[in-house]
Image (cartoon, helix red, strand yellow):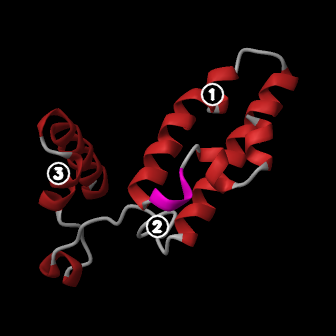
């Protein structure tokens, strides 16, 4: 993998110059991340951990460079924004329904609601 990284972002990600799209770059990055992420090598020797970290950083740099070359942001919008309604923003609070929608409702939404309830109770005391 290190030799692929040294030959440029397109080769690193295993993409064809002519058909690279932001979606293809992202898909290739995710595939390589599953294979080379440093967390997979956490129980091995420090040398292997360092090497896996270097490889992962090379893959990440290739991903970011390809997206910039395609005119896409490596991290669209930066951090995940917390949803606000106009009324909640005016009151300085979060739109709770928007947060539940953000996590997809269901069990995740129930967990978010429980956490928010606990925070509100703690703040009210």
Name the residue that disc number 1 marks. Answer: 39
Q: Give the image location of residue 41, x and y in percent.
A: 69, 21
Q: Residue at x 20, y 84 (%)?
A: 90
Q: Contact (CB < 8 A) between labels 2 and 3?
A: no
Numbered circles on residues, count: 3
Q: Residue at x 53, y 45 (%)?
A: 29
Report the side of 69 relative to 98 (left or right).
Answer: right
Q: Give the image location of residue 49, x and y in percent.
A: 78, 27
Assess whether residue 17 is covered by the magenta stretch.
yes
Sequence-first disc among 3 and 1? 1
Which of the pair 31/111 is nearer the observer?
A: 31
- Determine the CA span between mark 1 and mark 2: 23 Å
Sequence-first disc among 1 and 2? 1
Q: Contact (CB < 8 A) between labels 1 and 2?
A: no
Name the residue that disc number 3 marks. Answer: 100
Range of the magenta residues? 16-20
Q: Residue at x 56, y 36 (%)?
A: 32
Q: Look at the picture and state if 57 lies above or below 43.
A: below
Name the residue that disc number 2 marks. Answer: 78
Report the side of 59 relative to 118 (left or right).
Answer: right
Mark 2 or mark 3, whichever is nearer to me: 2
Q: Secondary structure at mark 1?
A: helix
Q: Quadrant of residue 4?
A: top right
């Amino acid at each position: 993998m290190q030799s692929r990284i040294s030959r440029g972002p397109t080769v690193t990600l295993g993409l064809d110059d002519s058909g690279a799209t932001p979606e293809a770059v992202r898909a290739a990055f995710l595939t390589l991340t599953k294979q080379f992420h440093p967390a997979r090598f956490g129980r091995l020797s420090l040398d292997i951990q360092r090497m896996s970290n270097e490889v992962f950083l090379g893959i990440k740099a290739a991903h970011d460079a390809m997206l910039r070359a395609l005119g896409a942001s490596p991290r669209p919008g930066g951090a995940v924004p917390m949803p606000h309604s106009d009324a909640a923003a005016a009151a300085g609070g979060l739109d709770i329904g928007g947060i539940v929608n953000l996590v997809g409702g269901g069990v995740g939404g129930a967990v978010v609601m429980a956490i928010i309830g606990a925070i509100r109770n703690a703040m009210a005391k």
